[in-house]
Image: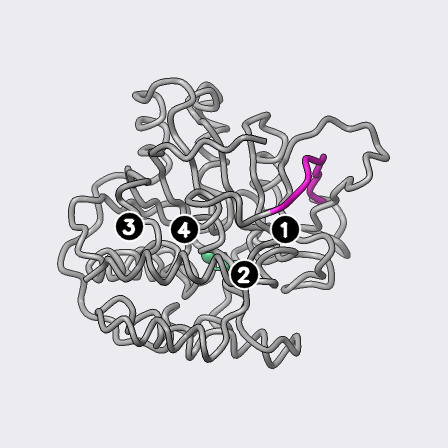
Amino acid sequence: MQHQLDKRTIIVDTDPGQDDAIALLFALAAADRLEVRAITVVAGNVPVDRAARNALVVRDWADCPEIPVYAGCPRPLVRDLTTAESVHGKSGLDGVHLHEPHAGLAAGHAVDFLINALRSSPEGSITLCLIGPSTNFAAALIQAPDVARRIREIVMMGGCYFTRGNVTPVAEFNVYVDPHAANLVFQSGIPLTVLPLDVTHKALTTPVRIEKFRQLGNRCGSAIAQILTSYGRHDIENFGVEGGPLHDPCVIGYLLDPSLFLGRRVNVVVETQSELTLGETVVDWNGLTKRAINAFWINDIDADGFYSLLTKTVARLP
Ligand code: RIB
Ligand code: CA
């Protein structure tokens, strides 16, 4: 598939979250390729107020005060909220000093912003990056189904198929927290590219990769190195991997250089009924069900190329 490497207008929906913070810095550093229209925040790794504060802190690190940050849904569509402080710390950004944000949130709810921003954008013009539970966008889609045609592509970090779950034996955190929202996205008919654990677990942090961020000598490189030094502890201890899987930045890496990634166009359905397998992304990898294709499911990465791109891009930041 010939990939377009033109400039994209993106909205990043996020639950910062240590890897979210690095994904945000990655996107903000790539201003020549990505126009970040806004950051919308959702409850996930930590409660929404804490996640929103963290997004403001990261915005300050990148010195991008002009980019609005909107707080969104404090809980999933149907389920109670499940958070991940055990992974990201109570602050949500363990490992680094968090200053008092220089400026506050934009007025209004993230869901209202999404609806208004999409309705005022040309058809097929907005790329939506979902790097937390999909609650905000699912709520927008329920309230205003017409916004779907304004979206060029959704690029989502979530799900797992070849790699087992990270929150239950079969479910990945973002989808598990709000499986109803995730399934709405998968069934929306909007062009969808998914970066699941299958690929993010091949993009592991290592001491050598972390040191390269520290050696950049800028504020953001130092913050990333500090975060990554703390990050991944949970995955290393629980899954025996040799580093932390750098989940959310893979979404931005895909937008900047899709040639670093490989995948297959498949059908995906999210389990929303069974308590045992709630949040499982059922991927029809071999086309056995004849269900319609609804996702480009990425399962491989040039990890060295990805880290090289990430490192040289964030080198541009303060
Ligand atoms: O399963 C990984 C995902 O859950 C990432 O987005 C991480 O930030 C957490 O939200
Ligand atoms: Ca996240």
| Badge 3 element | helix
Label 4: how many residues lie within 10 Å, few (<14), some (14-19) or many (20+)?
many
Q: How far separated are the C-alphas under marks 3 and 1?
A: 25 Å
Q: Residue at x 43, y 79 (%)?
A: 230
The amino acid sitting under disc 1 is: Gly
Q: Is the C terminus in the top left, top right, bottom left or bottom right quadrant?
A: bottom left
Q: Residue at x 36, y 78 (%)?
A: 95
The residue that mark 4 highlights is 14
Label 4 or label 1, whichever comes before in sequence order: 4
Task: Report the label total.
Answer: 4
Residue 188 lies left or right of residue 139; in this view the side is: right
| Image point (35%, 59%), residue name | 51
Q: Residue furthest right?
A: 288
- In the rendered image of this protein, does residue 177 appear above or below residue 110? below
Mark in front: 3 vs 4: 3
Check disc 1 and report the residue beneath it.
Answer: 159
Q: Please state which of residues 271 and 231 is positioned toward the viewer in this rendering.
A: 231
Indicate the position of residue 22 as horizontal and vertical percent values: 37, 61
Helix, strand or loop for disc 4:
strand
Label 4 to label 1, Cα distance in Å?
A: 16 Å
Q: Are marks 3 and 4 in contact (CB under 8 Å)?
A: no
